Amino acid sequence: QVQLVESGGGLVQAGGSLRLSCAASGRTFSSYVMGWFRQAPGKERKLVASISRTGGSTYYADSVKGRFTISRDNAKNTVYLQMNSLKPEDTAVYYCASDEGTGKYRYWGQGTQVTVSS
């Protein structure tokens, strides 16, 4: 079983930046594809960004391309989401999740709130 703990959320003004971190337990972190999702009030949870096991391949939703950067440090069992040029529409609870190679994200963190004020 994998435990994921997010941190780094908070309140920021539009145009500002935040860096989210997700620390994973276990010794097989490098075998997981990792993803960041977000869920705004009244909306479905959506994939924001994902990163391959080695970090060599990444995916971004169109809404965050050019503003967000996902990265990982397998030595620290941690995945990051650098968020720049934040907009009020980025306000949501952000979750990290792990995919063991099945194509489905099985383990989820508890989420961290990001609020962007205009």
Image (spheres, rainbow, N blue to C red):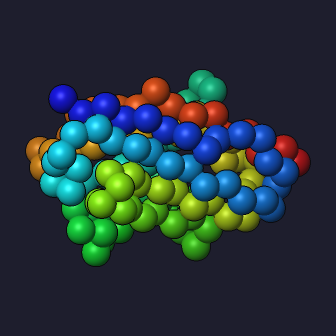
State the image coordinates of residue 83 (x, y, percent, origin top left). 62, 59
Q: Judge whether residue 43 can be spotted in this image.
A: yes
For the point 16% across and 48% down, the residue is 28
For the point 63% across and 34% down, the residue is 113
Q: Locate residue 27 relative to residue 48 in the image: left or right.
A: left
Q: Is residue 89 above or below residue 106?
A: below
Q: Locate residue 3 relative to residue 82 in the image: left or right.
A: left
Locate the N terminus and report the quarter of the image it occupies: top left
Asked where in the image residue 51 lies, by quadrant, the reply is bottom left
* Residue 28 vs residue 49, the one in the foreground: 28
* Residue 90 vs residue 108, the one in the foreground: 108
* Residue 77 vs residue 118, the one in the foreground: 77
Q: Judge whether residue 103 can be spotted in this image.
A: no
Q: Locate residue 62 relative to residue 17 in the image: left or right.
A: left
Asked where in the image residue 8 lies, by quadrant, the reply is top right
Q: Is residue 11 above or below residue 49?
A: above
State the image coordinates of residue 45 (x, y, percent, origin top left). 46, 35
State the image coordinates of residue 98 (x, y, percent, origin top left). 28, 43
Residue lying farthest to the right in this orientation: 118
Asked where in the image residue 54 lies, by quadrant, the reply is bottom left
For the point 57% across and 34% down, the residue is 112
